[in-house]
Image: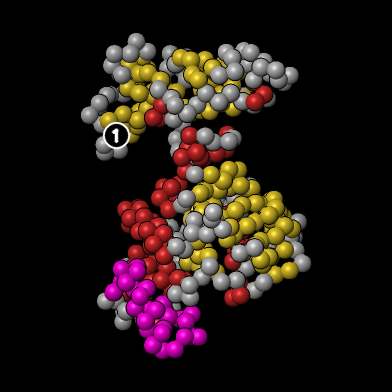
């Protein structure tokens, strides 16, 4: 059974009367990689700073290895928390070479022990041979590896990464994010990443907390966030998709313009509920992979927009009612704007939400 390394219980943080984090709770097991994902201003970086000890909490508590490190009346200084941090801007010392940067926090070790640890980390982050270079002589990706090695050097219990790849180009960001995950997993490091980039979160994290207005809306795997979002915000924020009007037929079926779906009916729409009954209207989440291109299908839709993505084309399609859906199609099916194409519904994970009250 995995041990819980980090626990946040109903944490709140405020600047004066402005509450930034509301009732934030999460569990992170030893060896797992978590992520706080959300738009700018949602409170994710503030949450990370509270965990690191850079910000106090006004309510709730933060525990590391079952020991409280923060609550309203107690605050353990950052240097006593056994936490490593990788910053957005790398924060390397420009006057120190790579080896000195990595070994900066190892002053308690002997010279030989420090040199051995630096050499070990250079090998881990695949930077052997650049120990004598200075930060300005390195690429962005290499600088980020040095920052990672420096954070890992003291063998922290927890590693925090604050938007670590935001300064890198897309292709390097994707490659480095996968490499960082491999390094963390190989070393058995427990970590939390903060990012606004879904691809980054999906590539690195075991569990992801989608944040909005200072609260975690859903703490879950990437698969469940995409296919089983708990509310409209998560459904709209994660991936792409549309909400199509539907009518509840029974406890397991919803009828939409494209056909009848078997899915997760909102609790308020299930038989026996006083709030809603058979025939109530809901909004059904449909992802691009739920709409399949099928030339033999009698159901047709008009192409109104297309985005070429190499192996695939993302089509925006207009249904007979005027409603729009998205469909991800292999790129050899190259249709023109205005063309009608056959489609069919193939949704394995159907999620429906009550229609908002106007």
- Residue of label 1: 312
Q: Does residue 124 show up magenta in the picture? A: yes
- Residue 208 relative to residue 68: left or right: left
| x and y, in percent, of residue 93 in the image | 44, 78
Instruction: Answer whether residue 162 is magenta in the image.
Output: no
- Residue at 44% across, 75% down: 153
Label total for image: 1
Decide: is 293 above or below 149.
Answer: above
Determine if residue 95 is in view.
no
The answer to whether 355 is drawn above or below residue 259 in the figure is below
Residue in the picture at 68% in, 54% down: 9
Quick one: label 1, few (<14), some, or many (20+) residues within 10 Å? some
Q: Which residues are magenta?
A: 101-128
Q: Quadrant of residue 184?
A: bottom left
Quadrant of the image containing the N terminus = bottom right
Q: Is residue 231 left or right of residue 11?
A: left
Tell me where residue 11 sits by quadrant: bottom right
Query: In the image, what residue occupies the spot 43% across and 80% down?
Result: 103
């Amino acid at each position: 059974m995995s041990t819980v390394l980090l626990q946040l219980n109903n944490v709140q943080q405020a600047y004066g009367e402005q509450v930034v984090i509301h009732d934030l709770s999460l569990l992170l097991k030893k060896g797992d990689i978590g992520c706080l994902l959300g738009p700018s201003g949602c409170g994710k970086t503030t949450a990370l700073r509270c965990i690191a000890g850079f910000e106090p909490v006004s309510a709730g508590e933060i525990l590391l290895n079952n020991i409280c490190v923060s609550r309203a009346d107690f605050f353990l200084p950052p240097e006593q928390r056994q936490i490593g941090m990788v910053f957005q801007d790398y924060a390397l010392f420009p006057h120190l070479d790579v080896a000195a940067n990595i070994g900066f926090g190892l002053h308690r070790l002997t010279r030989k022990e420090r040199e051995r640890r630096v050499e070990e980390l250079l090998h881990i982050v695949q930077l052997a041979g650049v120990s004598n270079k200075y930060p300005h002589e390195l690429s962005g990706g290499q600088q980020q590896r040095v920052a990672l090695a420096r954070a890992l050097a003291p063998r922290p219990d927890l590693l925090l990464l604050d938007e670590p790849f935001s300064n890198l180009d897309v292709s390097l960001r994707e490659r480095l994010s996968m490499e960082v995950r491999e390094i963390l997993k190989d070393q058995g490091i427990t970590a939390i990443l903060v990012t606004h980039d879904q691809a980054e979160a999906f590539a690195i994290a075991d569990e992801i907390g989608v944040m909005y207005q200072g609260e975690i809306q859903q703490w879950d795997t990437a698969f469940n966030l995409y296919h089983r979002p708990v509310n409209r915000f998560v459904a709209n924020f994660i991936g792409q998709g549309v909400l199509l009007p539907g009518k509840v037929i029974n406890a397991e079926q919803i009828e939409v313009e494209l056909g009848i779906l078997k899915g997760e009916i909102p609790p308020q729409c299930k038989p026996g509920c006083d709030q809603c009954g058979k025939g109530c209207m809901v909004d059904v989440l449909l992802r691009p992979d739920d709409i399949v291109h099928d030339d033999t299908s009698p159901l047709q839709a008009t192409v109104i927009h297309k985005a070429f993505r190499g192996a695939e084309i993302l089509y925006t399609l207009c249904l007979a009612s005027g409603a729009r859906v998205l469909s991800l199609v292999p790129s050899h099916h190259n249709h023109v704007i205005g063309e009608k194409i056959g489609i069919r519904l193939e949704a394995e994970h159907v999620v429906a939400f009550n229609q908002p009250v106007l």
